[in-house]
Amino acid sequence: MSEQKHHFNSEPEHYILSPETEPMLERFLFGNRTLVLIILAALTAVFAYGLTKVKLDSSIEKYIPLNHQYIQNYLVHKDDMKSGVANVKIAVEAVDGDIFTKDYMETLSKINDEVFFVRGVDRSGMQSLWTPNTRWTEVTEEGFQGGPVIPSTYDGSADSLEQVRQNVLKSGQVGRLVANDFRSSIIDVPLVEYDPETGEKLSYQQFSHDLEAKIRDQFGGDQYRIYITGTPKKLGDLLDGAGQIAFFFLAAMIATAVLLYLYSRCPKGTVVPIIASLIAVVWQLGALALLGFTIDLYSVLVPFLVFAIGISHGVQIINGIAIESGKGANREQAARQAFRGLYVPGMLALMSDAIGFLTLLFIDIGVIQELAIAASVGVAMIIVTNLVLLPIVMSYLGISKAGVRHAEKTERSDPVLWRLVSQFANRKVAPLPIIIAAAMAVVGFFVSQDLKIGDLDKGAPELRADSRYNLDNDFMVSHYSTSSDVLVVMVETPPEQCNDFKVMDAVDRFMWHMENVPGVQSTTSLVTVSKLVTKAMNEGNLNWSALSRNQTILNTSIQRAPSGLINPDCSMAPVIVYLNDHKAETLETAVAAVEEFKAQYDDTVEQKYFEMRIPQIQQAIANGEIDSVPVRFQLASGNAGIEAATNQVIAEAQNTMLVFVYVVVFVLCFITFRSFTAVACIIIPLVLTSILSQALMTYLGIGVKVATLPVIALGVGIGVDYGIYIYNRLEVMIIAGKNMQEAFLETLKSTGKAVSFTGITLALGVGTWMLSPIKFQADMGVLLTFMFLWNMLGALILLPALATFLLRPERMRQRHRDRHGDVPPAG
């Protein structure tokens, strides 16, 4: 390199600094290229080993906000709850005829026995027509009589089948375990949390496969149809669908390679960025595995984003090297110049990405927090692989002659498109995109006011409406009286006091209150049993279908209450509320109704009174410490209760996360460019995209939920890259002496070309997600595609329009002279 202090070529903004003025990081990396490559190769080997340790986790706990008060309440009574989240229902339908045939009963018995031995089933809690805990009861002149629905004397004869029919009618299971049309029945299957054979957490994906192979495939057919629902089965289906992500990844990689070659016309400039980005993915997955993290349904999408982000920054590096090579620089000089001009904006963009992703840690849901960590780790790896490894490797390989010729041709060309786009940096044209953007922001803001928190569809919104799971769920909903969407409210009392008249009366009032709430189908509790038994004990007279104030009669009426409606020490009695669906509006209405009742009926005495036994409670009442047996209604369990808690966490964290993302981007941009106008030019297009994306969600009927909330941070984090690269190059050209429109035209010819290529490539890549069988992935694909394209357009159209009015070129040049003397900026 020349010993003179500065050397300039024909381009006014381009220069080669002497060794004394080379950035220290550049001198270290390129002065020790061999050592750096050896170190990076060793790290790749370590992380590749870690890649072999990657595990797919389907634990339900990761998908719920464990620290939310509702979930804390549920965990206290988890062992006593029958209506938890780890339950599966298997319906067996007779295609022709009803269930009261010898062949159907034999088939149901075989299926029941097969399910009993499936790994992970809580065998003591299983319930079907063939389990002894499904009983019938009737009142006769001699008192109560009852027994198993299918008696021990059953032999398949016509008389036995008729007896089963009569027992089913007496059991109260029509509409619950038996369909309303008597053509199917259900096997209710609770699951254990840990695999009893391995001691590890139960794999819902393997459990789902076992049900498909041993139940649906073996017994389903023309004569009988099998329907399976429940959160564990849904997770299993989602994990199976997640396996197709590899095909989307491969398709995106092939498309990227083709587009990258057309862009660079250099095989080395195509292959090396892809390999560098794939190394970043290997590093990310390997590092997470070595740190003890697992991959779940959401973080499994992160490697694709890491690859896409890596490509976007790799394109900038290749573009810079090609331009420098076209100006006569040798391989090493071209790589050094590209690194020198891009490592600051590249580092800023990637740091913004990483810290922006970390804002997802505000959301107290395991899968989102792990997604945040996975994405941040991936971006940290890109800093090394694409800003260090890529330029060093290219300093050895260089751009091919065809690539250099293509870069020179592009540099000399004067595309009509870029000349048209550069008009947005003209003071006469610039007001137009600003006015349009302002109008779109206003309209988008008002439309987004109708954006809902939570699910807006029936069934499992994570899967498509025509998926097997949702078709099975539709069958359950249409043929059984009890909904699959259950909100469980836990009524807490001191031990052995859940049957006190005051408690039972409060529960009775609560059930009446909830049954009059829109969206609630019905309720059931210990009170339901008490009223039925009391009525039965009085010749079925409806006048006796009420709670008795006589405590002895109350005690007698609940002696045979099902275990799911009372815990062993009678300190908690759940009220099961069946909802029409789990839509956000339904959940909000139901939860608000419960909170309203709680405010009126909950006793606010100290916790110690809820731990006292009967003599102590009686003494406390006698001493005037409390008026009566204390009672409180605690939310929530059941799948609807869990989802209500999740929606509340998302609603609380949504705005906090969004504000923090923008604060991080603002601070980092200001530290780098030290100009409020620069920050405004970069951030305003991002804000517009965020507003429009929320309006799009409202228009498409996509709620803010676990799957879509991370998209907001991802869209802002990745989208800011465009603005940073465009502004950095624009500033360089302005300081070099060009007017605003000329500076922007030169920016478009180099960085603008790379930004438009990146935006289109990323959009095409995530656009393939729209074909996924997993609806939440398809939703993420729609939103990310929209955000990538709009962020790109914002950087190419709105940013220069804003810069035309906000930036002061002479002041920028003077500030640069004050800081650096008369040295033009690096090209």
Image: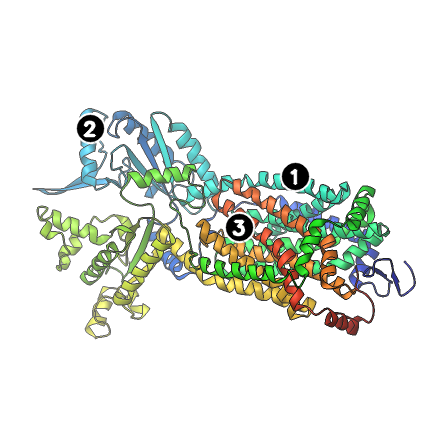
* Comes first in the chain, label 3 or label 2: 2
Q: Which residue is mark 1?
A: 254
Instruction: Residue at 88%, 61% (x, y): give it.
Output: 7
Instruction: Residue at 41%, 39% (x, y): give it.
Output: 469
Q: Position of residue 415 (x, y in %)?
A: 73, 49
- In the picture as drawn, the residue positioned furthest to the front comes out as 428
Q: Are marks 3 and 2 in contact (CB under 8 Å)?
A: no
Q: Position of residue 687 (x, y in %)?
A: 56, 61
**Mark 2 or 1, closer to the camera:** 1
Q: Position of residue 89 (x, y in %)?
A: 35, 40
Q: Nearer the viewer, residue 22 or 696?
A: 696
Q: Amino acid at mark 1?
A: Ile
* Comes first in the chain, label 3 or label 1: 1
Answer with left or right where residue 781 lies relative to residue 217. right
As measured in the structure, the alpha-carbon distance from the residue carrying label 3 to the one carrying label 2 is 59 Å
Q: Nearer the viewer, residue 429 or 808?
A: 429
Structural crowding at the residue carrying mark 1, measured as other residues with C-alpha within 10 Å and reported as few (<14), some (14–19) or many (≥20) = some
Q: Nearer the viewer, residue 688 or 187?
A: 688
Q: Amino acid at mark 2?
A: Ser
Structural crowding at the residue carrying mark 3, measured as other residues with C-alpha within 10 Å and reported as few (<14), some (14–19) or many (≥20) = many
Could you say which disc has been placed on residue 783 in the image?
Answer: 3
Q: Is residue 76 visible?
A: yes
Answer with left or right where residue 276 lies relative to residue 715. right
